Every structure is written in structure tokens, then in C-alpha cells.
Amino acid sequence: MLTCMNSLKIAIAGCGPAGLAAALMLHGQGHEVIVFDQFDEPGPVGSGLMIQPSGLAVLDRLGLAQATLDRGARVDGLLGLEEHGRCVLDAPYSTLGVPGAFGIGIHRASLFGVLYEAARAKGIAIETGHAVTGSTIDDAGRCLTFATRPPTKPFDLVVDASGRQTVFDTEEAGMLEFGALWASLPTQSDDPFSGNLLEQRYRRAAQMVGVLPIGTRAGEAAPEVAFFWSLRRADFEQWLQTPLDEWKDEVRALWPETDVLLDRIETREQLTFARYSHRTNRRPVGDRMIAIGDAWHSASPQLGQGANMALLDAWSLAQGLAEGRTLEEKLRLAISWRSDHVWLYQWVTKLFTPLYQSSTRWHPALRDRLLAPVSKIWPASAIQAQLMSGLFGFPLASLGLKLPDYEALSPPASVSSIASRT
């Protein structure tokens, strides 16, 4: 990573993957960095996510790729079947053409732990327990303001990594029709799931159930999976009133093998309802300020790119600060290196999400009758793999990144054919 000639005083709002990764990189360049977080104890929000090759390229340069894999689970592809058992999504990482490539399913707590422990080991200051309400600026710099404490001292730069509910962008986010119920559940050796695939079942696009292996969290005895069930936001209150066993029967009807997981859901409190939005901050750069991650762009998790895009944003910010001459130029460079890739994935995600989460009938018909057959034929199969991996649009080269040595990270998968597992 490039170093900077002039040290800056930098405040980072948000202690998620974007904020922690940016803190590690900017601290490594010699900047004075303080991370601010609203929680009394910083921690993750949510269940499982996918680290794609694009995000792993950043973690590898931070020296954290192996630690991430050790806490997560190797995922060799995505497999989706419609309600009658026909395969409509078969996306192995092997079609990328990168020897040994894979994704990593990981609990958000585990990814947080990898980044947070690295930040603490570097002595990076993290101040908690105060929600950021905004900022003020004068000739001395930009100060963060809070609900329960005085403003900070002036900083040369404020990095907004506070997520899609950022207070720095007042434009209302476009909430999506569908969210999802999530739970992290322990697994057993005889569970009827592959262990190295993200598996999904669909009833048209109105119902989806998925299982993602996410490794073993610190303090847990068994590996876990992230279990998720798509649900319209408008139907959530009704779900709260529905007997839990009645909902479980609905899930079993779509995917009977999930019975073993449903038996481990004993109370409604084990499930969290996640709401999703699609938004883009039209002005991610301001005077002594920049937005990264979901504070800049958020979308449906259908392509699994959120954390990966955030990691790329953080890397781009560090590169911009190293290469630019003035602060304005540094921030402009950071955004310019990411803007095309961000725009591309915002639109691709917007186009693809209704194929898997929508109330229409023609979206899943298009998915099953046209896209599924075409995706098995080159070059469509390669494009699908590029989209899934976060590499569509070639985001790494402009940032000076390259894919990690997968064969050094993990031995080859024992089974190469995803479809053979159906």
C-alpha cells in the first residue's frame, strides 16, 4: 500500500467493515485516525454475508485473508432450484477461470472480529457510545456533532462509513418491497446441506429460502449456517401474528430438508427481519468529507456485494490520499476510481433482484425459461461468474489490486461439479 507524505487527522464515523478497513489502511499510511461508533460496545449487525473475490483481494493486501477464511466457510458456488426441483441458478466459481477461486461465507460477527482485532492491535482509537448527528466546518477543519457529548476537535477529513442510515445524506432511501428473515443456526454433520454452497429454493420470486455456511464464530462449539426467508415488508406485521409452527410448515413445503434447521428455531426472537433499500448518495464528496460503503451506495443483497464494495471503497480512499496532491484531488481520485464499478453494480442489482424477490410472475418466468438455460453457455456462464464474484467491470486493476493466491489459502474442493449435488 502506498504511504502518504502528509499526515492528516481523520475521523471515521462507523465501526463496520468499511470504517474498520479504512481505519487500518489510513493508520498504516501514517494518518492520525479515530473511529466513532454509536454503540456502547462496537459490534456487527445481521447474520451471514459473502466475501467475494473482489473483497478478498483487499483483505489479502491487509494480511487478513487467511484469518477471514479460518473463521468462515469456503463456498464453491451458488445453487438455486425452483419449487419443482429444476435448477435455475448454477454458478460455480470454477467458471471464473481463476485457479482455485472460491467465496467465503462468514458471520458478520466473525468478519467484524477479524477487522476489529487488527485495528486494536495497531492501537487505533475507537470511541463508542455516541451517535453522530452531523458535523460543522470552519477554517480549522470539520467537527463531528453528537446527541450526548460535545463536538469533536476539528479534523482534516471526516469519512462517513455509517451505513445506509447515514445522517449526512438527507435524501430518502428507496425501500425495497422485499426484506428477509435471518437466523444463525448451528449445524450437525448429518444435515442434508452441501457445506460448501449457498443453496436456495424459490417459489416463483415471491418466496425464497436459503442456507449459507458461515463457519464457526468465536465461542461457539459448532459451525453455523445463515438461514434466510424472503418476506415482503408489508407482510412483516402479519408474520408476527402468525403462529411460528404455521410459518415453519410454509417453509417446509418449499424445501422439506430445512426441517432440521426449523426444529432449531424455538422462538421468534431467533429471527431478525432485515429491510433493504436501494440508494446512491449523489454527492459522496464534500468539503473535508467523503462517504464510503453503504453511506455512499446501498442495494439489495441479492448479488452479495455490500461488504465487498465497502472494502474496495476503503482501499480506493487510501490510494487516493496517497496519490493526490491536494485534499480535494485525493478525494476526487478516490471516488473516480470506484464510480463506474459502483454505478454498474447498482444497476445490475436493480435489474436482477426482481428475478428472485418480487411479486410478479413474469420476472421468475424470464429467469427460469431464458436466463437459466443461457447462463450455462459460454460466455454467459463466465459473465455470471464475474457478476457473482464482484469482478464484473474489472474493479481491481485500477486500484492496484490482484486476486489472492487461492491455492495457498485452501486446498481444492473435493467435488468440482455443483450440479452433481442436486
Image (tube, rainbow, N blue to C red):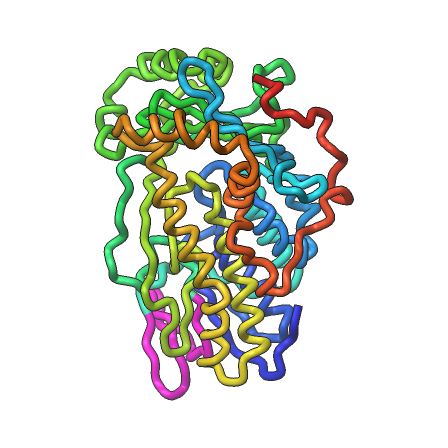
Quadrant that contains the N terminus: bottom right
Position of 373 with respect to 178 (left or right) is right
Where residue 48 appears, as percent x and y from the top left, is: 50, 37
Quadrant that contains the C terminus: top right
In this rendered view, identify the residue nearer to me: 354 or 266. 354
Q: Residue at x 36, y 73 (%)?
A: 151
Please tell me whether residue 15 is drawn above or below residue 209 in the rendered image. Answer: below
The answer, for residue 219, to whether it is visible in the render is no
Please tell me whether residue 229 is drawn above or below residue 391 in the rendered image. Answer: above
In this rendered view, identify the residue nearer to me: 306 or 34. 306
Task: Confirm whether the magenta stretch covers residue 158.
Answer: yes
Position of 241 with respect to 52 (left or right) is left
Q: Residue at x 42, y 18 (%)?
A: 266
Where residue 360 appears, as percent x and y from the top left, is: 26, 29
Please tell me whether residue 202 is drawn above or below residue 263 in the rendered image. Answer: below
Where residue 299 appears, as percent x and y from the top left, is: 37, 47
Which of the 4 image quarters holds residue 214? top right
Seen as rendered, the residue at the extreme bottom is: 139
Instruction: Count all numbered tags in the image, as a single digit.
Output: 0
Q: Residue at x 48, y 32 (%)?
A: 374
Please tell me whether residue 406 is drawn above or below residue 158 in the rendered image. Answer: above
Q: Which residues are magenta?
A: 135-159
Position of 117 with respect to 295 (left or right) is right
The answer, for residue 393, to whether it is visible in the render is yes
Task: Confirm whether the magenta stretch covers residue 360.
Answer: no
Where residue 156 appears, as percent x and y from the top left, is: 46, 79
In this rendered view, identify the residue nearer to me: 394 or 163. 394
Q: Residue at x 25, y 62 (%)?
A: 170
Position of 220 with respect to 66 (left or right) is left
